Amino acid sequence: MKNPLPVIIFLLMLTGFNNVFAQAPVITYASPQTYSPGTAIAPLSPVNTGGAVATVPIVSTFAGNGNAGAVDGTGNAAEFNLPQGVAVDAAGNVYVADQGNNLIRKITPAGVVTTIAGANIPSNDVNGQGTAARFNSPGSIAVDGSGYIYVTDAEAIREIIPGGYVATLNANFGSTQISADAAGNIYIAAGQVWKLNPFGVVSMVAPQNSCFNPFYVTVDASGNVYASDSSDDLIFKITPAGVVTTFAGNCNNAVSSGTPCGNCQGGFKNGQGTSAFFQTPLGLAVDASGNAYVADFSNQAIRKINPAGLVTTYAGGTAGILSGPVNVAVDAANNVYVVDGNTIKKIAPAAYTISPALPAGLIFDSTTGTISGTPTVTSQATDYTIKAYNAGGVGTAIVNITVAPNANNANLKNLTISSGTLNPAFAGATTNYTATVSNPTASITVTPTASDPAAKVTVNGKTLVSGSLSANLPLLVGPNIITIVVTENVTTSKTYTVNVTRLASDYAYLANLQLTSGKLNPAFASTTLRYTAGVSRTTFSIAVTPITVYAFETVTVNGAEVPSGTVSPPVSLNNGVNNISIVVTAQNGINIKTYALVVTKEPAAMTADVKDAANNGEFTIDEITIHQAVSPNGDGVNDVLTIDNIANYPDNSLTLINMRGTAIYEISGYDNLTRAFNGHSNITGALQEPGTYFYVLDYWANGELKRKTGYFLLKY
């Protein structure tokens, strides 16, 4: 006979292994924990000595055994008959509209099923206490924040008050699907979406149209309404302002004309928003985080839509898990309850959950149960309940966390400036920085962020909220010291300095230039650097008044410094051309602009020499005589400027200048004929005004370049 002992040992080991695997998680955390604002914590992870934590949601039968009946009891000892609506209250009690039995059933968190209203007999509506009341095919159920239960049947919307009495609330919306918010507002899908407030006032939330046919509704904590359109395989979202959008789903109507609804094929596809497919979506519910759960009937699945519209398969979709879900509800712990045939299924969340939410800056990883991050605010000692899930049940641990200031932490965790770049780059342990800004930057702001948000921060002596922008800090040219002091718990402080250098200006332009005699040509403009002016023969000197744009610019006139707005020392004038240089130096001492002014003084009056008496005062050199009168009036006398004997000196050039010092005529090879001044400028073409004009005649004589200057009178 073979020894049976090894087989027995193997079976015992296998049985023990399965028992361990089926155990609920047993989790613990190191507790209590004290953290400091602004300091990253060492990740805090659970220790699990029980069954492995589930990685996918866990589907189980919460109540009912699949047989049609009206039996109260615990778990699968109970029976339902075509249940339709499901809702859950704040205490975790589940309510079921048991349509085939005309009953309202209650399931405690422990799975105990009782009948709280109605009787298992056909009847029209009868109001009354608990089981003395009668319902006619109850199909939808909802619970508000005060524990009032609302039921729709074939005749009306009924209300079950917390004491159990059943009354008719509204007789106009029988056989509809409803949802309720915490305040007791009822949302109704009846061709369109309606709202029935606690005072009995009915208003329209969203009208029906060809592509919006709501069958089921639910509402989130922010007042957004979600509606399923079972015929078009779409999920809609309606904002509190009444804006209707397609939240998820696609008609998938390739057989139609391309409209977004009608002849819909639906499908089974996860994805973002309208890229996803549903197949006959029915009841839906929303959790506290804004995730929507949809009973996708024909796909035998529960679909999940996150707040951003991403659709995933939460449970089912595989044969044998769900047979045909028609409605869902979700509790505060994110357990989802599903009406599936004659049973109520429960879908427990996968992995880990935590309640309440952690202090700002700390992060809870729902996959691993690990707490990490950097707290940003203080928080008093608080117990946080963490739950881990698997098929064997739920493991619970309590973690006590305090976020308190660190008495020795007077560091900055960040420092930014509005202009320039910190040098070196910011580091909490580095306290001295420099920065350079351009001259136009007349002020700067800083944003210091303390490691401990509760620490006191001052900038140049003025208190500032950590992480906020300082007031504008004025900058002088050159170095400017900005002092930031962080004080923790009065006794500990740390000082940071930023030395901001504002560069000197490179601007070197005048705002204006004024003359004591004559007129600038062209009119003054800051960026025009060359000018001319003409003065009479009786003007023996001239002065200029340079005016700078900025007080820090310096000016010299012919080498002598002249303060802005001050008249320069007089500059002596010779007959003819005189050059005056105005030099502007920028504040930085590097950038320079030079304004050049050419002042032409009218020559002194000529006296005829006795030897030239026959020339009537005209000036004769090298047999060249320039007539001093031009009168282009067509009488044949002095119609052009006549230069006697100029034909003997063809290699010549002539420039004529008006009293303003502007050249009005320039020509080479002057010949009194085709190249002759007749009162018109050959530069602008304009007829010149009568008056005195100056000439400069250059010509070659016997290999020598000579020049004649003088004036003539133009009249008409």
Image: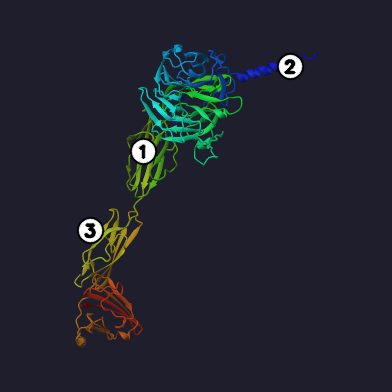
Residue depicted at 37% across the width and 36% down the height: 468
- What's the amino acid at mark 1? Leu
Residue wearing tag 3? 566
- What's the amino acid at mark 2? Val
- What's the amino acid at mark 3? Thr
Which x, y percent locates residue 548? 27, 56
Which x, y percent locates residue 325? 54, 25
Q: Using the rendered view, name the quadrant where residue 466 is placed.
A: top left
* Secondary structure type for disc 2: helix
Question: Sequence order check: which comes first, mark 3 or mark 1?
Answer: 1
Res. 586 in view: yes
Residue 515 vs residue 217, the one in the foreground: 217
Residue 473 vs residue 485, the one in the foreground: 473
The local crowd at label 1, few if under 14, some if 14 to 19, many if 20 or more residues have their Cα within 10 Å, is some
633 relative to 465, above or below: below
Question: Sequence order check: which comes first, mark 2 or mark 3?
Answer: 2
Please give left or right for residue 401 compared with residue 254 in the image: left
Residue wearing tag 1? 469
